[in-house]
Image (cartoon, rainbow, N blue to C red):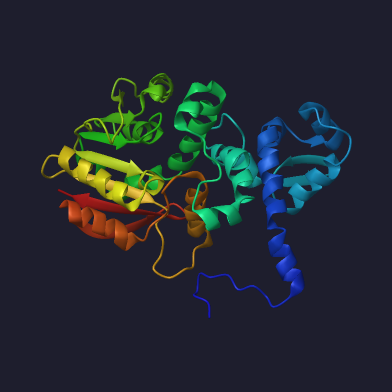
């Protein structure tokens, strides 16, 4: 029996083969993003030979590769010339503010290889794509790619987060684990009187200052280096834990929520968002995110909304339910 959100797989070997080959379609998108194909085509339509030359590809397979992207709806072809489809043109062209390819670049680099070891992860519980943060931070190219991924994910949620909370009444906000400050910076850009702090590891200091300056809010949003399990958290009217709790074990999530409660003044609020799980299995995208955490963290996973509400209630917060944001995320707000 399926729930309304659960996919039904036809009792048909062809349908099962298609599902088993779904990784091929994913790799088409990931490779096109890695190559910068959509950025090249943003300059205008091009023939297969022009694309091959621009991307420095070999002679075999290029036309099939491009036609497969047409079949997926990512490209369009007219008179032998290829151009971006609407989704690719809006979200997969680098340097556009709407660029959402940062996550895809990370998926290609880290998650795609890790999923090849899912069997081992399920047998051992051990991550299959360990990338120590210190190693990422020490490599400028890897750090830039990681931060781009974070921006592409949280940037899409800003409109919903903006609508879900009365930001006009807020003076200060602190994004805990806020990477280079994209979320706090965009919120501050939307609200002229809002001042912010971005709290994350010291290695992100330079990147955060540059990004906040680029957003035009460096005079109102600052970066504070620290480790939230070792250093005192910044104080603010509102604290945010966005895509943070799912990186940690249940015990560490509970501890972090308690630390946020201690940092807030009475009347303050904590905003938590992740791809929280539904009570009944239905959203494959949320479950895939949770399995990603199995593959790349020591103890992380997605968690049910009720579990999050429990963390906040146990810490002393008053909660008012949950709010869906973006395509697959859930926002929970706790008041002190």
Q: Nearer the viewer, residue 71 or 148?
A: 148
Q: In the figure, is residue 45 to the left or right of 36?
A: right
Is 189 positioned to the left or the right of 47 in the image? left
Q: Indicate left or right for 296 with 228 as reference.
A: right
Residue displayed at 77% across by 35% down:
45
Instruction: Reply above or below: 286 against 293.
Output: below
92 is higher (above) or lower (below) than 285: above
Image location of residue 108, percent across then percent down: 63, 41
- Residue 97 visible in the picture: no
Could you say which is closer to the camera, residue 245 or residue 178?
245
Q: Quadrant of residue 231?
A: top left
Residue 316 percent location from the top left of the image: 15, 52
User: Which residue appears at 71% of the width and 35% of the height?
Assistant: 37
In this view, the residue in front, 45 or 147, is: 147
Q: Position of residue 305 (x, y in %)?
A: 34, 60
Which residue is the extreme one toward the left?
A: 266
Residue at image point 49% right, 51% down: 294
* Quadrant hosting residue 264: top left
């Amino acid at each position: 029996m399926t729930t309304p959100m659960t996919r039904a797989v036809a009792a048909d070997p062809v349908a099962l083969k298609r599902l088993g080959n779904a990784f091929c379609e994913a790799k088409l998108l990931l490779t096109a993003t890695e190559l910068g194909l959509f950025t090249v085509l943003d300059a205008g339509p091009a023939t297969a030979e022009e694309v091959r030359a621009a991307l420095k590809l070999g002679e075999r397979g290029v036309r099939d590769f491009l036609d497969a992207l047409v079949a997926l709806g990512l490209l369009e072809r007219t008179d032998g010339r290829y151009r971006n489809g609407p989704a690719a043109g809006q979200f997969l062209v680098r340097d556009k503010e709407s660029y959402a390819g940062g996550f895809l670049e990370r998926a290609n680099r880290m998650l795609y290889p890790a999923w090849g070891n899912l069997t081992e992860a399920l047998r051992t519980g051990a991550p299959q794509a360990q990338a120590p943060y210190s190693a990422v931070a020490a490599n400028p190219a890897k750090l830039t790619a990681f931060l781009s991924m974070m921006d592409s994910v949280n940037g899409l949620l800003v409109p919903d987060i903006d609508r879900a909370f009365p930001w006009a009444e807020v003076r200060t906000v602190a994004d805990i684990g806020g990477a280079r400050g994209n979320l706090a910076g965009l919120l501050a850009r939307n609200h002229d009187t809002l001042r912010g702090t971005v709290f994350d590891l010291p290695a992100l200091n330079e990147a955060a200052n540059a990004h906040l300056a680029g957003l035009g809010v460096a005079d109102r949003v600052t970066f504070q280096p620290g480790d939230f399990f070792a250093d005192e958290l910044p104080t603010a009217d509102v604290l945010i834990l966005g895509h943070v709790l799912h990186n940690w074990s249940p015990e560490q999530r509970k501890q972090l929520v308690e630390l946020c409660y201690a940092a807030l003044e009475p009347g303050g609020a904590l905003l938590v968002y992740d791809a929280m799980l539904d009570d009944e299995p239905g959203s494959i995208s949320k479950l895939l995110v949770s399995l990603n955490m199995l593959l790349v963290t020591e103890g992380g996973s997605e968690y049910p909304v009720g579990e999050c509400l429990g963390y906040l209630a146990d810490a002393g917060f008053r909660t008012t339910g949950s709010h869906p944001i973006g395509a697959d995320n859930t926002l929970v707000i706790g008041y002190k």
